[in-house]
Image (cartoon, helix red, strand yellow):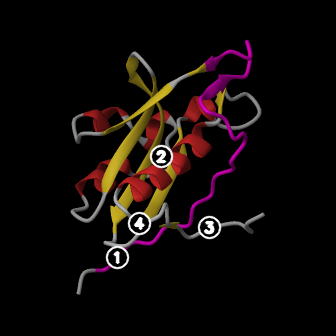
Amino acid sequence: MKNVIRYHIDIEIDQLTNSIRNTISGDSFTTDVFETSSTEMKAITKAKGWKFDWKSEVKEADRKVYKLTIKDNPNIIQGLASISDFGDHFYLHLVESAPFNLGKGKLYEGVPGNLFAFTCKLSWDRGYEGIIAFQSKTKLI
């Protein structure tokens, strides 16, 4: 039996928005979510500030990795999510904001909330009533 790696999601939903918001100007930007490719993952490394090994995550047969980008700017990844379809719900393995969207000096807020909302929409569209599951690293509020 294959060893399944289970992560605990350690991300704060900083804002619930219909878009992501620039923390400096306050401007909101519409987002898109696309499935990533292993080619794109070459630039997503721990050396560049990412916390997780996304290259290995995208190779897992039971999941897909999605990127959140600003509409009409698909080359700058704002955040990533790793998601599996369990047949009656979606399981969210990992969610991570881009390194420039972390901490007090983050450039955009709303990234994690958008990725969770995207996962719920996938679940809804598949007929799973929006049900998702994940393992939280911290206490849920």
| Label 2 vs label 4, nearer the camera | 4
Residue 16 falls left or right of residue 72: right
Assess whether residue 124 is covered by the magenta stretch: no
Under mark 2, the amino acid is Phe
- The image shows residue 113 at horizontal and vertical percentages of 61, 45
How many C-alpha atoms fall within 10 Å of the one at disc 4: few (<14), some, or many (≥20)?
some
| Type of amino acid at the residue the image marks with label 1 | Val
Report which quarter residue 84 is drawn in: bottom left
Q: Distance between the Cα atoms at labels 3 and 2? A: 18 Å
Query: Could you say whether the residue bearing mark 1 is in a helix, strand or loop?
Result: loop
Q: Is the Cβ of the residue at disc 4 closer than 8 Å to that at disc 3? A: no
68, 16: nearer the viewer: 16
The residue tagged 1 is 4
Give me the disc on residue 118.
2
Identify the residue at horizontal 56%, vertical 41% (top origin): 114
Q: CA distance from mark 4 to mark 3?
A: 21 Å
Report the magenta residues as a range: 3-28
Neighbours of disc 3 within 10 Å: few (<14), some (14-19), many (20+): few
The residue where tag 3 is placed is 136
